[in-house]
Image: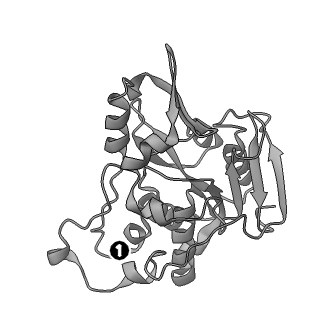
Amino acid sequence: SHCGACSAICPAYGIVVDPSMPIHFPNWEEDCLDCGLCVKICPRWNYEPKSGIGKYLEIFSAKSRRFEGQDGGMATEILATAMEEGIIDRAVVVSRTEDWLPKVIIATKVEQIASSSGSKYSFAPVMTELRKAVFRSKVGVGFVGTPCMISGLRMLQSKIKSFRKVKIAVGLFCMENFYYNSLKEFLANRGVDLRSAVWIGISKGKFIVKTKDGKIAFPVKELNPIVPSGCKVCEDFTAVESDISVGSVGSPDGFSTVIVRTEIGK
Protein backbone atom coordinates (compact mmCIF):
# COMPACT_ATOMS: atom_id res chain seq x y z
CA SER A 1 0.00 0.00 0.00
CA HIS A 2 3.03 2.29 0.40
CA CYS A 3 1.61 3.47 3.75
CA GLY A 4 5.13 3.42 5.22
CA ALA A 5 4.22 1.98 8.62
CA CYS A 6 7.16 -0.43 8.31
CA SER A 7 9.59 2.50 8.07
CA ALA A 8 8.22 3.88 11.35
CA ILE A 9 8.99 0.69 13.26
CA CYS A 10 12.18 -0.72 11.71
CA PRO A 11 14.86 -0.79 14.47
CA ALA A 12 17.57 -0.83 11.82
CA TYR A 13 16.20 2.37 10.22
CA GLY A 14 16.76 0.61 6.91
CA ILE A 15 13.36 0.80 5.20
CA VAL A 16 13.17 3.71 2.76
CA VAL A 17 9.99 5.50 1.73
CA ASP A 18 10.63 7.35 -1.54
CA PRO A 19 7.82 9.27 -3.30
CA SER A 20 9.06 7.99 -6.66
CA MET A 21 9.33 4.23 -6.14
CA PRO A 22 7.98 1.29 -4.11
CA ILE A 23 9.13 1.07 -0.49
CA HIS A 24 12.43 -0.75 -0.26
CA PHE A 25 15.17 -1.89 2.13
CA PRO A 26 18.40 -1.25 0.16
CA ASN A 27 20.82 -3.10 2.46
CA TRP A 28 18.54 -5.66 4.01
CA GLU A 29 21.02 -8.53 3.74
CA GLU A 30 23.46 -6.67 5.99
CA ASP A 31 21.16 -4.53 8.13
CA CYS A 32 17.93 -6.47 8.71
CA LEU A 33 17.66 -7.74 12.29
CA ASP A 34 15.03 -10.39 11.46
CA CYS A 35 12.81 -8.99 14.20
CA GLY A 36 9.61 -9.34 12.17
CA LEU A 37 8.15 -6.03 13.37
CA CYS A 38 7.51 -4.83 9.81
CA VAL A 39 5.29 -7.86 9.23
CA LYS A 40 3.49 -7.54 12.57
CA ILE A 41 2.35 -3.98 11.90
CA CYS A 42 1.77 -4.24 8.13
CA PRO A 43 -1.92 -3.53 7.39
CA ARG A 44 -1.69 -5.57 4.19
CA TRP A 45 -0.06 -8.75 5.55
CA ASN A 46 -3.35 -10.45 6.45
CA TYR A 47 -5.43 -8.06 4.43
CA GLU A 48 -9.14 -7.73 5.04
CA PRO A 49 -10.41 -4.95 2.76
CA LYS A 50 -12.34 -2.19 4.50
CA SER A 51 -15.04 -0.31 2.65
CA GLY A 52 -18.14 1.82 2.91
CA ILE A 53 -18.79 4.87 5.04
CA GLY A 54 -17.88 3.03 8.26
CA LYS A 55 -19.02 3.87 11.78
CA TYR A 56 -19.71 7.51 12.47
CA LEU A 57 -21.28 9.97 14.89
CA GLU A 58 -22.03 12.78 12.44
CA ILE A 59 -21.70 13.60 8.75
CA PHE A 60 -21.93 17.14 7.40
CA SER A 61 -20.53 19.64 4.90
CA ALA A 62 -18.30 22.36 6.30
CA LYS A 63 -16.01 25.19 5.35
CA SER A 64 -13.29 26.83 7.40
CA ARG A 65 -13.86 30.51 8.11
CA ARG A 66 -10.14 31.24 8.18
CA PHE A 67 -8.18 28.71 6.08
CA GLU A 68 -8.09 28.09 2.35
CA GLY A 69 -7.70 24.43 1.45
CA GLN A 70 -8.27 21.89 -1.29
CA ASP A 71 -12.03 22.31 -0.84
CA GLY A 72 -13.35 23.62 2.47
CA GLY A 73 -10.02 23.70 4.30
CA MET A 74 -11.39 21.45 7.03
CA ALA A 75 -8.37 19.15 7.48
CA THR A 76 -6.31 22.27 8.20
CA GLU A 77 -9.03 23.67 10.49
CA ILE A 78 -9.29 20.45 12.52
CA LEU A 79 -5.56 20.13 13.17
CA ALA A 80 -5.16 23.84 13.88
CA THR A 81 -8.03 23.77 16.38
CA ALA A 82 -6.58 20.66 18.06
CA MET A 83 -3.30 22.51 18.51
CA GLU A 84 -4.98 25.66 19.82
CA GLU A 85 -7.04 23.63 22.29
CA GLY A 86 -3.94 21.88 23.63
CA ILE A 87 -4.90 18.41 22.41
CA ILE A 88 -1.70 18.20 20.33
CA ASP A 89 1.62 20.00 20.27
CA ARG A 90 2.71 18.63 16.90
CA ALA A 91 1.07 17.74 13.61
CA VAL A 92 2.54 15.61 10.84
CA VAL A 93 1.43 17.18 7.56
CA VAL A 94 2.50 17.16 3.92
CA SER A 95 3.75 20.29 2.19
CA ARG A 96 5.42 20.35 -1.23
CA THR A 97 8.23 21.84 -3.27
CA GLU A 98 7.69 24.17 -6.22
CA ASP A 99 7.45 21.20 -8.58
CA TRP A 100 4.90 19.37 -6.35
CA LEU A 101 7.29 16.87 -4.78
CA PRO A 102 5.69 15.97 -1.41
CA LYS A 103 7.58 17.26 1.61
CA VAL A 104 6.64 16.10 5.12
CA ILE A 105 6.89 18.57 7.97
CA ILE A 106 6.34 18.23 11.71
CA ALA A 107 4.35 21.37 12.43
CA THR A 108 4.58 22.96 15.86
CA LYS A 109 2.70 26.13 14.92
CA VAL A 110 -0.71 26.75 13.37
CA GLU A 111 0.95 28.74 10.58
CA GLN A 112 2.93 25.66 9.54
CA ILE A 113 -0.23 23.58 9.40
CA ALA A 114 -1.92 26.20 7.24
CA SER A 115 1.00 26.41 4.82
CA SER A 116 0.71 22.69 4.01
CA SER A 117 -2.94 22.67 2.90
CA GLY A 118 -4.05 21.14 -0.39
CA SER A 119 -3.75 17.69 -2.01
CA LYS A 120 -0.51 16.51 -3.63
CA TYR A 121 -1.47 13.17 -5.27
CA SER A 122 1.93 11.57 -4.70
CA PHE A 123 3.21 9.31 -1.92
CA ALA A 124 5.03 10.96 0.97
CA PRO A 125 7.22 9.54 3.79
CA VAL A 126 4.67 10.52 6.43
CA MET A 127 5.23 7.54 8.74
CA THR A 128 8.99 8.06 8.82
CA GLU A 129 8.44 11.54 10.21
CA LEU A 130 5.65 10.36 12.52
CA ARG A 131 8.25 8.24 14.32
CA LYS A 132 10.18 11.42 15.14
CA ALA A 133 7.06 13.34 16.13
CA VAL A 134 5.81 10.84 18.70
CA PHE A 135 9.18 10.74 20.45
CA ARG A 136 9.40 14.54 20.61
CA SER A 137 5.81 15.24 21.64
CA LYS A 138 4.96 15.96 25.26
CA VAL A 139 1.21 16.45 24.71
CA GLY A 140 0.01 14.64 21.61
CA VAL A 141 0.37 14.40 17.85
CA GLY A 142 -2.06 15.23 15.07
CA PHE A 143 -1.88 13.15 11.91
CA VAL A 144 -3.37 13.48 8.45
CA GLY A 145 -3.06 10.76 5.85
CA THR A 146 -4.66 8.54 3.24
CA PRO A 147 -6.79 5.54 4.30
CA CYS A 148 -3.88 3.09 4.08
CA MET A 149 -1.77 5.37 6.29
CA ILE A 150 -4.57 5.51 8.84
CA SER A 151 -4.69 1.69 8.84
CA GLY A 152 -0.92 1.60 9.27
CA LEU A 153 -1.16 4.03 12.17
CA ARG A 154 -3.80 1.90 13.91
CA MET A 155 -1.60 -1.18 13.54
CA LEU A 156 1.33 0.73 15.06
CA GLN A 157 -0.84 1.93 17.94
CA SER A 158 -2.05 -1.60 18.64
CA LYS A 159 1.51 -2.84 19.12
CA ILE A 160 3.69 0.11 20.20
CA LYS A 161 2.78 2.36 23.12
CA SER A 162 4.61 5.48 21.88
CA PHE A 163 2.38 5.74 18.79
CA ARG A 164 -0.63 6.11 21.06
CA LYS A 165 0.52 9.71 21.45
CA VAL A 166 -1.32 10.34 18.18
CA LYS A 167 -4.46 11.92 19.61
CA ILE A 168 -6.26 12.86 16.42
CA ALA A 169 -6.04 11.09 13.05
CA VAL A 170 -7.62 12.79 10.04
CA GLY A 171 -8.21 10.50 7.08
CA LEU A 172 -8.50 11.82 3.53
CA PHE A 173 -10.92 10.40 0.97
CA CYS A 174 -8.74 8.55 -1.54
CA MET A 175 -9.25 6.55 -4.73
CA GLU A 176 -5.57 6.15 -5.58
CA ASN A 177 -2.17 7.75 -5.14
CA PHE A 178 0.80 7.89 -7.50
CA TYR A 179 4.55 7.58 -7.55
CA TYR A 180 5.85 11.10 -8.09
CA ASN A 181 8.04 10.37 -11.12
CA SER A 182 5.24 8.44 -12.84
CA LEU A 183 2.78 11.29 -12.35
CA LYS A 184 5.31 13.91 -13.42
CA GLU A 185 6.12 12.00 -16.62
CA PHE A 186 2.44 11.33 -17.34
CA LEU A 187 1.60 15.04 -17.10
CA ALA A 188 4.69 16.07 -19.08
CA ASN A 189 3.51 13.85 -21.95
CA ARG A 190 0.31 15.92 -21.95
CA GLY A 191 2.18 19.19 -21.99
CA VAL A 192 1.90 19.95 -18.28
CA ASP A 193 4.97 21.16 -16.40
CA LEU A 194 4.31 20.64 -12.70
CA ARG A 195 6.32 23.74 -11.87
CA SER A 196 3.63 25.83 -13.55
CA ALA A 197 0.76 24.15 -11.68
CA VAL A 198 -1.04 26.20 -9.02
CA TRP A 199 -3.76 23.63 -8.17
CA ILE A 200 -4.28 19.92 -8.77
CA GLY A 201 -7.51 18.10 -8.04
CA ILE A 202 -10.02 15.44 -9.03
CA SER A 203 -13.64 16.36 -9.62
CA LYS A 204 -16.52 14.56 -11.34
CA GLY A 205 -14.25 11.94 -12.87
CA LYS A 206 -11.73 14.46 -14.18
CA PHE A 207 -8.10 14.97 -13.17
CA ILE A 208 -7.63 18.74 -13.25
CA VAL A 209 -4.45 20.80 -13.31
CA LYS A 210 -4.77 24.56 -13.06
CA THR A 211 -1.76 26.54 -14.24
CA LYS A 212 -0.97 30.22 -14.41
CA ASP A 213 -2.09 30.17 -18.05
CA GLY A 214 -5.27 28.12 -17.80
CA LYS A 215 -6.66 24.69 -17.00
CA ILE A 216 -6.07 21.18 -18.32
CA ALA A 217 -8.48 18.33 -17.57
CA PHE A 218 -8.77 14.71 -18.67
CA PRO A 219 -10.61 11.59 -17.48
CA VAL A 220 -9.14 10.04 -14.34
CA LYS A 221 -9.28 6.62 -16.01
CA GLU A 222 -6.46 7.72 -18.32
CA LEU A 223 -4.21 7.47 -15.26
CA ASN A 224 -4.96 3.75 -14.82
CA PRO A 225 -1.63 2.60 -16.35
CA ILE A 226 0.33 4.36 -13.58
CA VAL A 227 -1.91 3.42 -10.62
CA PRO A 228 0.26 1.38 -8.17
CA SER A 229 -0.78 -2.22 -7.52
CA GLY A 230 -1.56 -1.55 -3.85
CA CYS A 231 -4.19 1.02 -4.78
CA LYS A 232 -5.89 -1.39 -7.18
CA VAL A 233 -6.95 -3.73 -4.35
CA CYS A 234 -7.83 -1.06 -1.77
CA GLU A 235 -11.55 -0.48 -1.13
CA ASP A 236 -11.24 2.00 1.75
CA PHE A 237 -12.26 5.27 0.10
CA THR A 238 -13.34 7.10 3.27
CA ALA A 239 -10.60 6.09 5.76
CA VAL A 240 -12.97 4.21 8.05
CA GLU A 241 -10.39 3.87 10.86
CA SER A 242 -9.78 7.60 11.28
CA ASP A 243 -11.14 9.90 13.98
CA ILE A 244 -12.43 12.26 11.31
CA SER A 245 -12.60 11.70 7.55
CA VAL A 246 -12.45 14.63 5.14
CA GLY A 247 -13.03 14.85 1.39
CA SER A 248 -14.96 16.66 -1.31
CA VAL A 249 -17.36 13.97 -2.54
CA GLY A 250 -20.95 14.72 -1.55
CA SER A 251 -20.47 18.41 -0.80
CA PRO A 252 -20.94 21.60 -2.85
CA ASP A 253 -17.90 23.24 -4.43
CA GLY A 254 -15.79 24.97 -1.81
CA PHE A 255 -16.97 22.73 1.02
CA SER A 256 -15.57 19.58 2.64
CA THR A 257 -17.53 16.48 3.54
CA VAL A 258 -16.69 15.68 7.18
CA ILE A 259 -17.33 12.28 8.76
CA VAL A 260 -16.88 12.43 12.54
CA ARG A 261 -16.20 8.94 13.89
CA THR A 262 -14.94 9.22 17.47
CA GLU A 263 -15.55 11.33 20.57
CA ILE A 264 -12.09 12.92 20.35
CA GLY A 265 -12.87 13.74 16.73
CA LYS A 266 -16.14 15.36 17.75
Q: Nearer the viewer, residue 202 or 145?
A: 202
- Tell whether 91 sits left or right of 68: left
Residue appearing at x 68%, y 37% in the figure: 71
> Where's the N terminus, which quadrant?
bottom left
Residue that extends furthest to the left in the rendered view of this protein: 30
> Where's the C terminus, which quadrant?
bottom right
Residue appearing at x 39%, y 81% in the figure: 39
Residue appearing at x 60%, y 74% in the figure: 164
Q: Nearer the viewer, residue 206 or 146?
A: 206
Decide: is 101 above or below 261. Answer: above
Decide: is 134 above or below 175. Answer: below
Q: Is residue 132 visible?
A: no
Q: Residues within 10 Å of mark 1 (few under 14, many from 20)?
A: some
Residue 228 x, y percent position in the rendering: 39, 56
Residue 177 x, y percent position in the rendering: 47, 51
Q: Is residue 231 visible?
A: yes
Residue 122 x, y percent position in the rendering: 43, 46
Residue that numbered label 1 is attached to: 10
- Tell whether 237 sits left or right of 249: left
Residue type at tag 1 = Cys
